[in-house]
Image: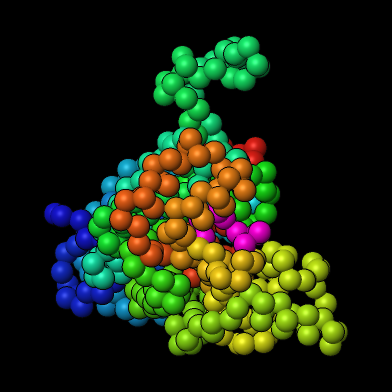
Amino acid sequence: MSRTVIVDALKRTDFGAEVNIKGWVRTRRGNKNVSFIALNDGSTINNIQVVADNEKFGDEYLKPITTGACISVTGKLVESLGQGQHVEIQAEKIEIYGIADPESYPLQKKGHTMEFLREIAHLRPRTNTFGAVFRVRHNMAMAIHTFFHERGFFYFHTPIITASDCEGAGQMFQVTTMNLYDLKKDETGQIDYSNDFFGKQASLTVSGQLEGELAAMSMGAIYTFGPTFRAENSNTPRHLSEFWMIEPEVAFNEIAENMQLAQDFIQYCVKWALDNCKDDLDFLCNMYDKELIERLNFVVNNDFERVTYTKGVEILEAAIAKGQKFEFPVSWGTDLQSEHERYLVEQHYKKPVILTDYPKEIKSFYMKQNDDGKTVRAMDVLFPKIGEIIGGSQREEDYLKLKTRADEMGVPTKDIWWYLETRKFGTAPHSGFGLGFERLLLFVTGMSNIRDVIPFPRTPNNAEF
């Protein structure tokens, strides 16, 4: 008999049918006559109840069926009289695939801290919490691809190994086949990469944006969706060393179209979660964040307020003058912190906010410069609870302005000559943005630590599993 996944079995109403289900035991309880086994196969947050006659199977056979054990059950689908489910399985045959010793299996039926579960990341997907989070993660990936595909974007694969630093920050993981303890150096003391695999310094990418721009300038509208790496020594609930990024780039879009695309995209993804992940979101809302569903609807149902950085700073300074306390100072030219961004969203405008026209000194070299000589056409999308969730800009299409700004910021021309050349050959206005996938998941799931929305988090001093 072919297997029925539990999410489908729970929907069936053909009582009396024989079915086969397989999964892992959540709990087993009962009395001297009957055992009730809660079984889950990961397809849904909900367990299906298996009812086993103790006399039919025997106590010794049922004894190894404890929390964590894996079993196959063939039996009759019947209407359940218990609360919480409308179907259950009357077991006729049980096959034990694998036992889980109660003395050593760490996921017994009790509460576990997030910190403890990170230490057993190979097992935590079996918990209700992480099963829910990773199903939502899958759905968000599907929403992203569907959104862009339906709008004529092309999925473009940018390199993971690169010789350029998109941000000009230098916080990159180097890639080498050489013995790090015996690096060859030239007469000036600089590392000689001539014998290395690529013959030059190579690193893991921090962004696919620059290559994405090249594709947009030939294919019109593209998006990237892949892993990126930042060698920042940041031990915070919002930073990972390895994470996934979504980066659309669109030829001929200017900043206004870019802002609208960002709003449409994020609202589409959040609505997808509400429409397709109801059971998982309800569980996460009840267990971790009572306001989660309300906050998701808040984003879907509100237009995003467009505000200049200068106006945002004026609002924050006025709030301070009236007694509002912030941990970090605010003045024109400073990079706003999460607390400032959240004030604008949660207390002042009471809706998501897109901040634009940032001081050029705190933004990257590739952003289009405004006529005032002080600001660039950057944009950040700000959300409740999280602050910035999307960062983007209209890109500078003028060759001389772009090269001058790269020189000012110390970005080596030899590493981005190919990027500069697109401004020589058929340049055009274009825009794009980046969304950290795990930041989106933090918002959608209500989890409080970014390490808990990716299966195997990579952070300073942590590369386990």
Q: Which of 205 and 415 is in front in this view?
A: 415
Which secondary structure is most common in the magenta stretch? loop
Residue located at (69% from left, 67% from top): 336
Q: Residue at 57% x, 55% y: name it.
A: 364
Residue at 64% across / 51% down in the picture? 115
The foreground one among 141 and 56 is: 141
Residue range corresponding to the magenta coloring: 360-367
Question: Would residue 184 be counted in the magenta stretch?
Answer: no
Q: Is residue 55 visible?
A: no
The spot of residue 139 in percent (x, y) is 36, 65
Give the vertical position of 290 relative to 334 (above or below).
below
Residue 415 image position (x, y, % from top left): 48, 37
Tell me residue 37's x, y (percent). Answer: 39, 61
Viewed as shown, does residue 101 lie left or right of 47? Answer: right
Left or right: 307 with respect to 252?
A: right
Q: Is residue 149 above or below residue 66?
A: below
The answer to whether one can see residue 147 in this image is yes
Q: Which colour scheme is used?
A: rainbow
State the quadrant of the N terminus: bottom left
